[in-house]
Image (spheres, rainbow, N blue to C red):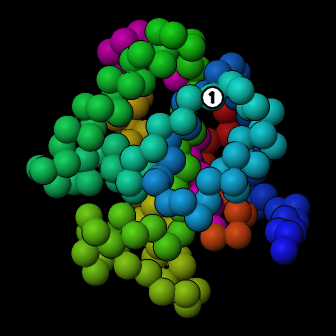
Amino acid sequence: MSIVRTTVDYQNLSYAPPRGNVLLLGCMDLRLLDETLAFMNRDNLTNRYDHVILAGAALGALGGLRPEHGHWRKTFFDHLEVAVALHSIQDVYIMEHRACGAYGKFLGTYGQFGDTPEELARETAAHRKYAGLLTAELAKWSEEQKYPLRVRSFLMDLRGGVMLLDDATA
């Protein structure tokens, strides 16, 4: 049996291309590894990105907003520091995804979403919120380090379709 993959239409993806090497923060969800690779290749980033994987992506890098996972934030920023030093990272991509089990684990029932249009909108808003919180922390880090970083946040559906979460146009 062979697997047939179709070309995915990427939605709402009008943004400046990455300037150099990228640090990609993604979730541990094994259903989307191939789709994430395809997205990065589509952005002309083959062999030009470091891939950091934390359950919940942005929420994980924020320590899941739970004291027992607070060290995840330090791990993420320690990794970023090394990636900048070794690979001259200029852009950070935050790749969130729909039906994220880590959101349910970290946030309880608030992090569980259905498939109705209202629930999909609520899910998108939650991913936008936590990606935005991490983006703010990355901006602070960038300023403190006097090292410019550009951050882009995306939301991938379970078929590999991707939408831009942030509204930056630069």
Q: Is residue 149 magenta?
A: yes
Percent position of residue 123, x then y: 47, 73
Q: Residues within 10 Å of mark 1 (few under 14, many from 20)?
A: some
Please name the amino acid that badge 1 sits on.
Tyr
Quarter of the image holding residue 152?
A: top right
Give SS at disc 1.
strand
Percent position of residue 140, x then y: 34, 26
- Give the residue at x 42% y 24%: 80
- Give the residue at x 43% y 50%: 57
Start-end of magenta stretch: 141-157
Q: Is residue 117 left or right of residue 163?
A: left
Quadrant for the C terminus, please. Answer: top right
Quadrant for the N terminus, please. Answer: bottom right
Q: How many marks?
A: 1
Q: Is residue 10 left or right of residue 52?
A: right
- Give the residue at x 47% y 53%: 27
Q: Residue furthest front?
A: 1
Percent position of residue 83, x then y: 48, 19
Percent position of residue 139, x then y: 41, 29
Observer able to see residue 128: no
Q: Residue furthest left?
A: 67
Question: Along the line of sight, which residue is nearer the eye, 55 or 103?
Answer: 55
Instruction: Please name the residue that numbered disc 1 is placed on.
Output: 49
Q: Is residue 161 magenta?
A: no
Would you place residue 70 above or below residue 34 in this image? Answer: above
